Every structure is written in structure tokens, then in C-alpha cells.
Image (cartoon, coloured by chain):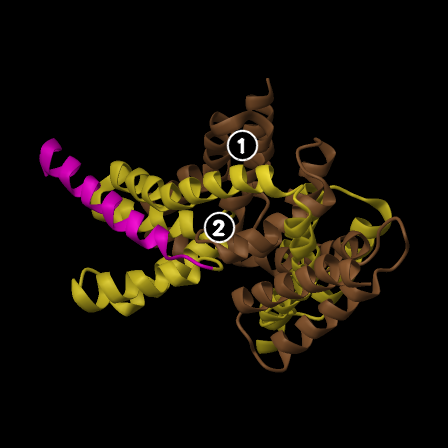
Chain colours: A brown, B yellow
Amino acid sequence: MIILKLFWVFVKIGFTSFGGLSMIPLISSEMIKNGWMTAEEVSDIVAIAEMTPGPLGLNCATFAGIRAAGILGALVANLGIFMPSLTLSLLAAIFFERFSKARLMRDIMVGVRPACLGLVVGVCVTLSLTNYGGAGGISFPAVGIGLLDTLLLFKFKISIPKVIILSAALGLLIFGVLPRLI
Amino acid sequence: MTFTEKLKKALRLFADFIQFGVFTFGGGWSIIAQMQRRYVEKEKRLTPEELLDLTSLGRSLPGTMVGNVAMLYGYRECGVLGGVACIFGIALPPLVILSIITVCYSAFRDNEWVAAAMSGVRAAVVPIIFSAAVGLLKGTFKFPPCVAVFVITLVLYLAFGLSCVYLVIIGAVCGLIISEIYERRGKSERK
């Protein structure tokens, strides 16, 4: 049963996402709702997906699939996420000439793109609550790392994998080494 | 093309796309770059314009852009078999790598050093998503009402916890209405 559920959830994610980033909100809510991941794990998988080859959606499918139902779960979740490619893209390929000039998709995207942006900003807010907060209120070291990363990404255009490695090192130092010294 | 020829071709596509799949760090654009180098520059199977057409169509369809482009190119080269071969090829490397990582993650996440490092990494995730969202801004607000769609989606998601599926569908309907209105206005102004 869980196999079917996994497949269906990732079919839903596949058909309602346009571009990797817009998958995060739906992945986040579906994973947490079904108890396949915690909010922390959603953040972890986003970071892991950014550091490993493959688009975010596939990496989340594999991660959630294995954790929910082993390797078979991963296969089924991957198949789910590719369903739009196996059906809609196939149709589009067959009728390529007509499809590439079709207005319908372009008109739909006029509304879907701002909606997706709204979802992405929304998920940033909800992820902030878990990543910079917790049981003991605001975690100031985490906020500090976040601000530093924002500066590095926007001002100095440092690449994402480098920012992740730096943040891991800072985390190790602040949350791992420092409490032992004091 | 006989069936054996077709099968051979599909296997070649499968092998090509496994290679592309190994080097797709941080999203799908790197496979487009690799297709460009291989199919446009080296093998001259595609013109730059054709690749651009495939990419923009793949982007506007739902799902992963990478999977969509793989299907569009594979079908073009060798029918349904080719499309499926390309998708399986592009999916295989991330599946293997992430399977290994997931097993390691599950084993080590409770180690206190790993947990400390992951706390730092989690702090980076929101800035990363945010920086990627800024990249999406271009062309997102095509008409003024698109801003309203953005705000309404954000509020419905955060305050009312409405499912993303419904919100994307609402966005699609709004897109149709907005385009209809602005196109009609555009036409009547021209008259």
C-alpha cells in the first residue's frame, strides 16, 4: 500500500511542479504530512540535492522512497516524478510542431509562475521557523550563518556547493567544537 | 529503421544520457550545456535553435525539465523507445548516488559531529532557495495582476495551509484569465 501511496504522491508532485525549485513546497508538505520526513530532513535533502548530481525532484524522490519503503520505494517514487515526461512530453514530442506554437501552455504559465514564486517564498518562511528556531527560541548562531550565507550568495556570488561546505564547517565549529571548549 | 537498429540507437542514447546524468550538479541546466556540446557542436544532430526549442518546451511542461527534454530529444531520434531510454539514462546516476547517500545519512545523522555540521548546513538552505527564487523573478510578473496572484498564493499557503496542488491549479486558471483579458485589450487597442 505504501508503494502505491508513494507513487501517487510523486505523480502529484510531478504534475504540479514547473522547474526544480517549485517542487520544494509540495515535497515539504507531502513528506511531513505522510510522516516520511521531518521538517529538518526536508532542509537536509534540499542541501544534499544541491551538492549531488541530479535535479532536486529526483533526489527527493529517491531519499523519501528509500526512507519510506526501501529501494523499491525509491524506484516507484522516481517513476512517479517522471510521469509528466512519460505522458505529456511524449504527446508534445509527437505533436511537436503544433505544441511548440500552442498558446495554451504559455497562457497558463502567466499565472503558474507567480503562484510558484509565492509557494517558494512561503516555504522559505516555514523552513526558517525550523532552521533558525527550535525548542529554545531563536538560534542566534544559525541566524548568523544564514546571514553570512546570504551575503556570500548575493554579494560575492559564491557557488552553492561552496556555501554549503562552509556552512557545514561553521556548524561543526559552533555546535560541535565550541560547546566542548566552554 | 529495423528493430535491431532501433534498439542499438536507443542503447546509445541510454549510454549518452547516463553520462549527462552523472554531471548534473545543481539543477538541469548542465545537461542542456552537455547536450549543446555533444549534439550541437560535435555530432551536429541538432541546430542551436532546435535545442533552444526543445529546452523551452521542456521547461513549460510540468515535471522535471531534464526528464521532459530527455523525452523530447529521445523521441525525435528514435521514437518512444528512444524517449524512454533517455529518461532511464538520465535517472539512473542520481538514483544510485542518492541511494548510497540516503543509507549513509540514515546511519550517521545521529552522530553528534554530523548533527552539528547539518545544523550549519540547514542554516544555508533558506538563503540558497531564496537566491534561486531571485533567478526566477525574470518574466514572472508579465502583467500587473500577476503580482496579485503571487501575494494571494503566498497568503493562502502560509495562513490557510492550502495544498500546493490547488494553488498551482488556481494559478493556471488565473493565467488563462489574465492572458485572455490582456490579449483582448491588446487587440482592441490596435484597432
| Residue shown at 72% from the left, 68% from the top | A145
In the image, is residue A38 above or below residue B41? above
Q: Chain of mark 2?
A: B
> Which quadrant of the view contains residue B188?
bottom right
Q: CA distance from mark 1 to mark 2?
A: 27 Å
Can you give x and y, in whole percent of width and height, for residue A49 in the image? 53, 52
In the image, is residue A142 above or below residue A34? below
| Residue shown at 62% from the left, 59% from the top | A113
> Which quadrant of the view contains residue B78?
top left
Residue at the extreme top of the image, as rendered: A1
How packed mark 2 is, by other alpha carbons closer than 10 Å (few <14, some 14-19, many 20 or more), is: many
Magenta segment: B1-25
Question: Relative to the observer, which residue lies in front, B52 or A152?
Answer: A152
| Residue shown at 42% from the left, 37% from the top | A87
The residue pinned by badge 2 equals B61
The kind of residue on which mark 2 rests is Leu
The residue pinned by badge 1 equals A66
The kind of residue on which mark 1 rests is Ile
Q: Visible in this render: residue B169? A: no
In the image, is residue B86 above or below residue B141? above
* Residue B75 painted magenta: no
Question: Relative to the observer, which residue lies in front, A128 or A94?
Answer: A128
Can you give x and y, in whole percent of width and height, for residue B151 in the image? 78, 61
Q: Chain of mark 1?
A: A
Question: Relative to the observer, which residue lies in front, B88 or B111?
Answer: B111
How packed mark 1 is, by other alpha carbons closer than 10 Å (few <14, some 14-19, many 20 or more), is: many
Q: How many circles with numbers are drawn on the protein? A: 2
Q: Do the dots labelled 1 and 2 sit on one chain?
A: no
